[in-house]
Image: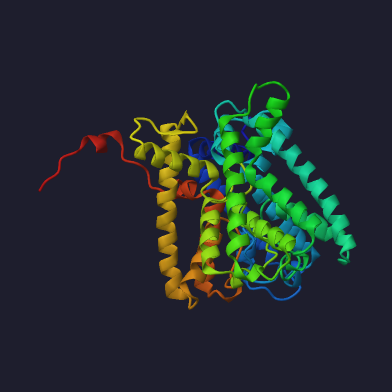
Amino acid sequence: MASDPHSARQMRFLARMNRFFTTTHPAKLLLFGYLSYILIGWALLCLPLFQQVSVSALDALFIATSAVSTTGLVSIDPASSFTFGGEVVILLLIQVGGLGYMTIGSFMVLTIHHRLGHARRRTTKAAFNLPDDVDPVVFIRSVLIFTLLVEAVGAAVLFVIFTQAGVADPLWPAIFHAISAFCTAGFSLFPNSLEDFASNPALNATISALSILGAMGFLIVVDSWRTFLGRKKYLGFTTKIIVRITLLMLLCGTALMFIVEPTLQALPPADRLMTAFFQTMTAATTVGFNTHPIGSMAPAILMVFFFLMIIGASPAGTGGGLKTTSLAALIGLVRSTLKGRDQIRFFKRRVPLDKLQNAAAGLTYYMVLLSVSMFLLLLTETAPFEVLMFEAISAMGTVGLSMGLTGDLSDLGKLIIIILMTAGRVGILTFGIALATADESRDEEADNTLVI
């Protein structure tokens, strides 16, 4: 019996796809996955069905990239530019971006096949920087349960807050802002973000809690749950580092802004402290909401925000940045070098060489990418240097804070920010690895003859 040509072509296609996923570097798979989501979102947002007013293709691409990368920078106002259906598309892109490219796909595979293949396991480990002792299957299930639970509770609390504040039709804004906050996206349905709620303690506390839970990372959730169930005796060292550094960044940033920022001095002490904490939190977790105008802040505080946005959130979380664990590794390197130690240590623990190498390479690639992007932005834009620097760092850290430049960017400027947001979501070092050319073969390495 002759074989069905259609079935044969289908089998060859599936074989090529399987070969692609099993032989391609995890970093390239991650970049490919996020680009796929961005392109799908772009195509949907370009449909007139989802637009209240005419939106250019470039602005639609900018919004789709910002949503998938959970950045929150917007070149146009989403609430007035898109219909309710368009807002739903943006929220789905935020949710997919926050959970991660591999989480959604792997969960679908688990639902159908009840197991993960080797390619998905290694890519999931690369996407979330998981330790060897964490099972990707358990991790993915824990992530989804935790995410849906926290977002549901957050939406319920925000519904009450928005109702009391007199927000029209509060249910949808409550759901939207709960997901946006937990995914550290910073997208808001209000034209001035959350500035109208600057003196609302309940909203400040709820958004902060959602953002911190998302930014500190799913790895902490899994580690804490395993400890609670008695499967581990103590919390892991990574968890302790993340908690300590996150708290240190929040405390130092809040204190500096409370004391130094001149635009807060006229506020009552309680509101001043609340605003200082919220703006520090929104930079450190890369959530990007603001209750205070960013463009009016003093240069000294902008420097503090530069540092917070560059470091960003923690591994296996929804936030961006170089990550708190990279900061810990680099601090360990500096301290150990100054003390003349023969090993790199942090909190009396040895830092593995591969972690130190990743931290140093990540910082180096970050500075190179930032330098190149700043050079190009200075050629294409007319804004002051510090405004362009703030925009670039915000995009690379997937923060979403802006000094008011985003809507005024040129077309080339928007494309540069789109690339930076994509790099920030994939991970600065992962983005570099994905773009890297193939290394030399063993035969090429053996040829070390230099003719002078």
Which residue is pictured at 63% across the width and 36% down the height? Answer: 219
Q: Is residue 380 left or right of residue 158?
A: left
* Residue at (60% x, 53% y) in the render: 284
- What is the x, y in percent for residue 343? 38, 30
Image quadrant where one finds the N terminus: top right
Q: Is residue 387 above or below residue 128?
A: below
Q: Is residue 451 visible?
A: yes
Q: Quadrant of residue 94?
A: bottom right
Q: Is residue 7 above or below residue 134?
A: below
Query: Of all residues shown, which one is farthest toward the left?
Result: 452
- Name the residue furthest bottom: 382
**Viewer-nearest residue: 247 or 373:** 247
Q: Position of residue 7 (x, y in %)?
A: 63, 38
Image check: 80 left or right of 334? right
Q: Is residue 152 left or right of residue 399?
A: right
Q: Is residue 114 visible?
A: no
- Residue 41 horizontal/vertical position (percent): 66, 58
Depth order, front residue of 131/289: 289
In the figure, 360 relative to 136: above or below?
below
Q: Residue at x 57, y 53 (%)?
A: 35
Q: Quadrant of residue 106?
A: top right
Residue nearest the viewer, comparing 381 with 22 = 381
Residue at image coords 59%, 34%: 240
Q: Is residue 265 left or right of residue 342?
A: right
Q: Nearer the viewer, residue 284 or 252?
A: 252
Q: Position of residue 321 (x, y in %)?
A: 54, 51
